[in-house]
Image (spheres, rainbow, N blue to C red):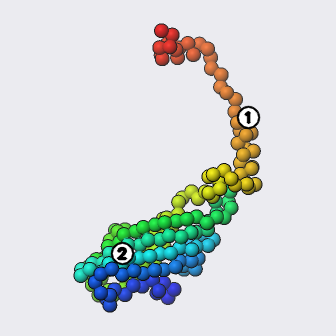
Amino acid sequence: MKELKKFDIPFIGLKEGSHTFEYQIDKEFFNIFKFDEYNKVNVNASINFVKKSNLMELHFNTTGTVNVPCDVTNEDFDLDINGNLPLIVKFGSVYNDDDESILILPQEAYKVNVAQYIYELIILSVPTKKVHPQVLDGTMESEALKKLEELRIKEEKTVEKESTDPRWDKLKDLITGKNT
């Protein structure tokens, strides 16, 4: 994919040591992967790339916001995200990415594409349940919350307190030893 070419890191020409790569991730990045659950995306992805003689260490760090609908009120809000991912890149006879923390590249490889790792790190940084911060602190005013509150009050009124048979209460006293 031509769109992901800017996420290629050619490591053949790099000197041994630490190098930093920065990427600004937006909604277009997720469109490439055909992922449309986010309304807006503003995430900074930083990679600390450490080249050694026989392997490479990549430390991914993402910070920013994704605009998502609240699971309670369905209102859009900016959700802060942070993510970290360490990755070891080794060389072998064939490409292998079965282990999530180790990538094996063929000996003849000269670059590594980091787009998939950035994509997965951002996706995994978003919690499964997305709740607007104003819902959590109780300051949000919305029609959905009002309707939920109305329904909750009706449910409490319809649930009657169960009455117990006094004979069973006497038996329960025997078990707990309250009548001694």
Disc 2 marks a residue whose amino acid type is Leu
Q: Nearer the viewer, residue 67 or 94?
A: 67
Picture quarter containing residue 84?
Answer: bottom left
From the viewer's perspective, tell me whether residue 67 is left or right of residue 122: right
Q: CA distance from mark 2 to mark 1?
A: 58 Å
Residue at image position (40%, 68%) is 85
Query: Is label 2 in a helix, a strand or a loop?
Result: strand
Badge number at residue 54: none
Say few, some or many: other residues with alpha carbon within 10 Å of mark 1 (under 14 / 14 to 19 / 20 or more): few
Q: Is residue 128 above or below residue 180?
A: below
Image coordinates for residue 119, horizontal then vertical, percent: 48, 73
The tag earlier along the polypeptide, 2 or 1, is: 2
Q: Which residue is mark 1?
A: 157
Q: Residue furthest top?
A: 180
Image coordinates for residue 39, horizontal then vertical, percent: 63, 71
Q: Residue furthest left?
A: 53
Is residue 94 visible to us here? no
Q: Nearer the viewer, mark 2 or mark 1?
A: 2
From the viewer's perspective, tell me whether residue 32 is left or right of residue 39: left
From the viewer's perspective, tell me whether residue 33 is left or right of residue 147: left
Image coordinates for residue 30, horizontal then vertical, percent: 55, 76
So how many labels did they put on this image?
2
Residue at image position (56%, 77%) is 26
Image coordinates for residue 11, horizontal then vertical, percent: 34, 86
Report if the CB atoms under discs 2 and 1 are less than 8 Å apart: no
Q: Is residue 95 above or below residue 15?
A: above
Disc 1 marks a residue whose amino acid type is Lys
Say few, some or many: other residues with alpha carbon within 10 Å of mark 2 (under 14 / 14 to 19 / 20 or more): many
Badge number at residue 58: 2
